[in-house]
Structure formats: C-alpha cells, structure tokens
Image (cartoon, rainbow, N blue to C red):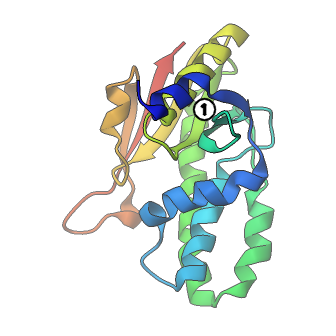
Amino acid sequence: MGPLSSNLLAAKLRPFGMKNLPFIVDVVAPLWSPPVGDAAFKRFNVEYIVRNNICENDYRFELVDADGNLLSAAFLARKGDRSAAGGWFDRESVRFPAGLRQASEMSRTYLSLMDERTFALMSGKDIKLSLFVSRKAGSGSVILERICERLRGEGWKNLFLWTDCDCNWQWYGKHGFALVQEDTYEPFSDEHEDYKTYIFKRPF
C-alpha cells in the first residue's frame, strides 16, 4: 500500500475552513479561468465561482490527512440555501474595468440560472452537491462517499448536481448518478458547437 492510500485511509472529514479557500482556487483556476483579463482578474472570476458554491450552512466539508493538509473539499446546498458570494462579488469587482466586469456578470448569470434549474427539480428531502474538488488523486471519491454515508444517515432522499460540457460530466454516470435534464445554454454556444448543461441525481 502506497503513502497516498495510507493517507486516504487515515484521512479525517471535518468542517471546511475558509483559510483553505485559496487551495481550492489553485486547483480550479487552470480549468475555469475566463479567456479575458490579466491574472488578477482571472483569479477573481474563479474565486467568485468557488464562493458561489459555498452556502451559509453546515454542509461544507474538507478531507485532511494526519498532518492537517487539505486533500479535498465538498460543498452542498439544501433547497433555498444561498451563498454570500454576491456581496463579495459586488465589493471586489470594482477593482476591474467595466468590460471585464461585464464578462464576470455573464458567469454570475449562468451560475444563478443553473442553480435555479437544479433547485426547481428538488424536494425538501433532496440536497445539492454544489462543488467538490480534489487536491490528491482519489481523495475526491473518498470525500464524496463519506458525505453520502452521512447524508443517508440524516434521511436525505437524493443528491442532485449540475455540470456542463466543460467538465468531465461523463464521470457522474459511472458513479451512480442518473441524468435527469440536459439543455443547451445559448449565450455560451456558437455556430460550431452547442454548450450543453447537465443535471444529475443520485439516490441515497
């Protein structure tokens, strides 16, 4: 058994600490950075996306190794839960020119729409996986399974999530999730390719 496997076996699930937010942004920044703006703007935009997925609730988790190093994190939302990202966006976006703020507003509109679409499919017994990020190979699956075990014990019925064609959306179909809605998001589509969005559901 290698060192990573040992770390995962001994890993601890605990409430997410916001001090670890920069580590999450580091992971997703290469994937989610917009095509416009300098490095500061790109990181701002990505941090907003991450913050948008962290709701003001008790369903914010991190998986850490024996030394307290962050392995992965996951954030969930009950129907009606909201994040504090809007206020942060309004404060921080004033640093950037109007043209760049407009690009971020497009991201903001898209995220809000997809959250609304997903919540509309959920009952009060369902919960949404807003985001999970892995910093070490295998730790994303570990945190997801540990959280599912906890949520099952709390009596939740289904785990929902949304994703899009920029992500590895096929992964979910291979890990117990069923596709319940597929759409085309026209503002991000072009004459060559439709920008597809997907909503998945997994029973507990």
In the figure, is residue 97 to the left or right of 195? right
Percent position of residue 38, x then y:
53, 86
Residue 186, compared with residue 1, is above or below; it is below
Is 80 in front, or is 42? 42
Residue occupying the point 66% across, 54% down? 52
User: Which residue lies under the disc numbered 1?
Assistant: 128
Q: Is mark 1 on a helix, strand or loop?
A: strand
Percent position of residue 177, x then y:
41, 24
Percent position of residue 168, x then y:
34, 44
Residue occupying the point 60% across, 26% down? 122
In the figure, is residue 4 to the left or right of 193? right
Q: Which quarter of the rendered picture does the C terminus lie within?
A: top right
In the figure, is residue 9 to the left or right of 16? left
Percent position of residue 8, x then y:
54, 28
Is 52 in front, or is 44? 44
Quadrant in the rendering for residue 35? bottom left
